[in-house]
Image: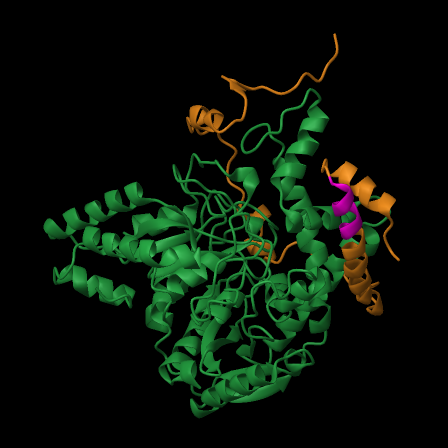
Chain colours: A orange, B green
Amino acid sequence: MKISREDVERVAELAYLDLSEAELESYRNQLDDILEYIGKLDELDTSQVEPMAQVLAVDQSADATLREDVVEPCNVAGDVLKQAPDPEAPYFRVPKVIER
Amino acid sequence: MSANWTIDGVKEALASKKVSARELAADFYARIRERDSELNAYLTLSEERAYAQADRVDSMIAAGKPLPPLAGVPVAIKDVISTRGVRTTCGSKILEHYIPPYDATAVERLEAAGAVILGKTNCDEFAMGSSNENSAYGPVRNPEAMDRVPGGSSGGSAAAVAAGLAVASLGTDTGGSIRQPGSFCGIPAMMGSYGRVSRYGLIAFASSLDRIGPFATNIRDVAAVLKVIAGRDSNDSTSTTAPVPDYRTVMEKPVKGMRIGIPKEYFGEGMDDEVRKKIEAGIEVFKKLGCQLHEIHMAHTDYAIATYYIIATAEASSNLARYDGVRYGLRVQNDSLIAMYRKTRGAGFGAEVKRRIVLGTYVLSAGYYDAYYLKGQKVRALIARDFRDAFTKVDAIVTPTSPVPAFKLGERTNDPLQMYLADIYTVTGSLAGVPGISVPCGKICGKLPVGLQIFGPAFGEARVLQLAHAFEQAGGGTV
């Protein structure tokens, strides 16, 4: 067994994810199977391999195509706030986070 | 009116005034109303926007103006791609009422080319799935076999085109989500190279893997749509400046003498015997076309699923952190900010999305990062090297798209790992960043479509389309 119930609880805590009792148990079992399967990567010796974070060639990478950092007005604040569950223009309102 | 429209057919019918763009859109909506209650391919119809665009096309025709390449062509857009003013749910309850304030670049380009956007198509929640059964809005049915899945995650985009409810559509592919449903529904489906099509406005699942690409009923139409959406976009720094050729023209070149690699690792255990026979018959078609066949080895193929499920879930756990109930989407109210986050996410995400967030968070967490995420990035480098090495010896690689044909609804939902293994032949190309297409390659029992996959080197879309077109013209679709 690779993963315990406490592991799943800890990870759910990190991800700010409420899980039910039933979800905790089924995810523990399923993740155990998946991690067991993923364990097959240990068959490969990768000590001499550089990790690959993205696939583009150097001259096509994001670094090579950065634009000038200039401000461009886009005037979407109103439309954006319309999508908010609890807006109070020009703010998003959230539950109180600081005690007086 | 016929349900079998092509882009050329639309062009001809509009030019000869047999039909107006508005009448054509209305005809598609009528067919959608008649058929889609059983298929469930569409989540939202964008009639107002579609008719406004159709009227623009009709007035261009009336004024005798030259028409753009997709003038009046009815298309559908996967619901993970942002459409201004048109609800975009990602197949999730957490975005049930979300209306994007802007268009994805691919959508903007389609509309600028004259396409009429009929609506948004169903998909697995946040594009996570291989059967479309993870949609919060119910599964899509396969128009070729109503008791079976259409594949996923772009199941709605594939089913809509296969059922004649759109002439072409956009899907997204992270591990096979365009090619596999194309294969299951019996239509061509293409993923260009990573960086070929702008991801601006594509709601992110795994940013180093996500790609937008077309579904259509024939290769010429796939080429036409890809040509329109491809190319550099300053809003996506990973979109490249590599030139976009006129795919329709260059793909007419003969394929005689082309070297095709057949990797034996793609014909291993777990592959359906009938699928194998069809793919072997498909390979014979290339032989008859004068291609040279070479057996090749891609040694790390067997490690691709494990690698993919580390990298894709790690990126997903990070990308999906944005759904916190503050700026958009669902909020479950609570007096504490943290509890509001937790309850919102717990209630808004479905089972597969939560499973992947948990897995992705786990592989990135302190103490496990090196063993999983770093290891995955290293094996990804080996898989990409397999492709680079292969393309020094051959011009293209031919494989099955999926080891099995469309499976029955509900058949695999209880075992996530079995569902993941459905992507075994597609995730390799996703990890390597190369272009790939699935083309129809006969049907099993005269009913269940089989897809043949063609990979090309990075930015070798023209060559992939050239082979796909030759295969289609030589009758590959009915082997």
**Image vertical order of residue B332 relative to residue B384, above or below:** above
Quadrant of the frame with the C terminus of chain B: bottom left
Q: Give the magenta range.
A: A19-27
- Asked which quadrant contains residue B186, the reply is bottom left
Marker count (numbered): 0
- Counting from the top left corner in percent of width and height, residue B447 is at 45, 78
Q: Residue at x 46, y 74 (%)?
A: B439
Residue B91 placement (x, y as % from top left): 52, 47
Which residue is painted at 45% across and 47% down in the image?
A: B233
Question: Residue at the location (25% across, 45% down)?
Answer: B51
Q: Position of residue B123 (x, y in %)?
A: 51, 53
User: Residue A65 versus residue B321: which sits nearer the camera?
Assistant: B321
- Between A97 and B382, the one lying in front of the other is A97
Q: Quadrant of residue A38?
A: bottom right
As drawn, is B24 to the left or to the right of B215?
Answer: left
Q: Position of residue A60 (x, y in %)?
A: 55, 54
Residue extending furthest toward the top: A100
Residue A50 seen in the current view: no
Mark yes or no: residue B364 visible.
yes
Identify which residue, B35 or B23, lies in the foreground: B35
- Left or right for B76, reference B374: left
- Residue B355 falls within the magenta-colored stretch: no
* Secondary structure that dominates the magenta span: helix
Please determine whether, in this image, residue A4 is positioned above or below residue B142. above
Tell me which residue sits at (55%, 47%) in the image: B136
Q: Quadrant of the N terminus of chain B?
A: bottom left
